[in-house]
Amino acid sequence: MEVKLGQQSVYIYTGSKAFRPDLPSVLMIHGAQNDHSVWIMQSRWLAHHGYNVIAVDLPAHGLSEGPLCETVQAMAAWCSDLLDSLDISAAAWLGHSMGSLIALEAAASRPDQSWANVLLGSAFPMRVSDALLDAAQHDEQKAFAMITRWSHSGITHLPGTPGPGFSIYNQARRLMERQKPGVLFNDFMACNAYNRGLECAQAIKQPTLILSGALDLMTPPKAAKSLAETIIGADMRIIEKAGHQMMAEQPDAVRVAIARFLAGARSRRVLPNA
């Protein structure tokens, strides 16, 4: 669906389900140079199993209008404003990669709006290599090739090519190629500059799940350990046979981990207008 936030149009994927105030909400935030479609295997399941799904395209990503938010803090504030505009008092914030930093920031700075957090492919600090940052600024196609290779556990792995004419590996690259020029450099600069990770982690009180791909070269599991060790009660799980794009490479394993965690978090909390 499309909604207005200020003067800008915002696209939200809801899993083809209408909003129900009696159900808990989940806000799903994509990573750099991506959009809502990275969550397609998990968002639709959640929408059909008792949740209001808000899988959003961030400003100037996917089908949402700009301008871009230049910092993680600005992205978190924008997501917060979006929830307010939808009259959703609190949501579980699910964030992948850059989106995990957004969820982390919001959980600490806007705790009343968050009843649980799932951080996928996260790390702190989330530094971008000089070579990749330079390619993002001056040669996006080169950057796309680097990211696609480093974000997956392999090129010909299953289910990467489950049938003729289909490839998870190439699908991820096409998704990046359809974003607007300049988005990737903006997103990488935001990740590179974000320095509040441990400060926010120390402040988080909500139930938190951290999911890392065992074969992730972009944000390897060891890069998320500082967050897992700092967030009180955080549960860290490793998704086997998956790289950074774990939602596509191991969709069922990711879905099951998210669903079980959210069910447990729901059972421990009364959710007003969630």
Image (cartoon, helix red, strand yellow):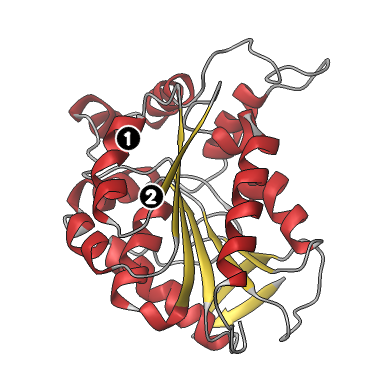
**Residue 56 or 220: which is nearer the viewer?**
220
Q: Residue at x 58, y 55 (%)?
A: 261
Q: Tell me if I can see residue 49 in this picture.
A: yes
Q: CA distance from mark 1 to mark 2?
A: 15 Å
Q: Quadrant of residue 269?
A: bottom right
Badge 2 marks a residue whose secondary structure is helix
User: How many other residues sit within 10 Å of disc 1, few (<14), some (14-19) or many (≥20)?
Assistant: many
Closer to the N terminus: mark 1 or mark 2?
2
Q: Which mark is residue 136?
A: 1
Q: Which residue corresponds to mark 2?
A: 98
Q: Residue at x 71, y 44 (%)?
A: 41
Tell me if 151 is positioned left or right of 222 in this view.
Answer: right
Q: Is residue 87 above or below residue 235?
A: below
Q: Quadrant of residue 97?
A: top left
User: How many other residues sit within 10 Å of disc 2, few (<14), some (14-19) or many (≥20)?
Assistant: many
Q: Residue at x 72, y 70 (%)?
A: 1
Tell me if 180 is positioned left or right of 217 in this view.
Answer: right
Badge 1 marks a residue whose secondary structure is helix
Identity of the amino acid at label 1? Ala
- Residue 143 lies, in percent from the top left, at 38, 27
**Residue 259 or 65: which is nearer the viewer?**
259
Q: Is residue 171 above or below residue 235?
A: above
- Residue 190 lies, in percent from the top left, at 27, 53
**Residue 174 or 228: which is nearer the viewer?**
228
**Residue 91 or 1: which is nearer the viewer?**
91
Q: Closer to us: mark 1 or mark 2?
A: 2
Quarter occupied by the C terminus: bottom right
Q: Residue at x 37, y 78 (%)?
A: 111
Identity of the amino acid at label 2? Met
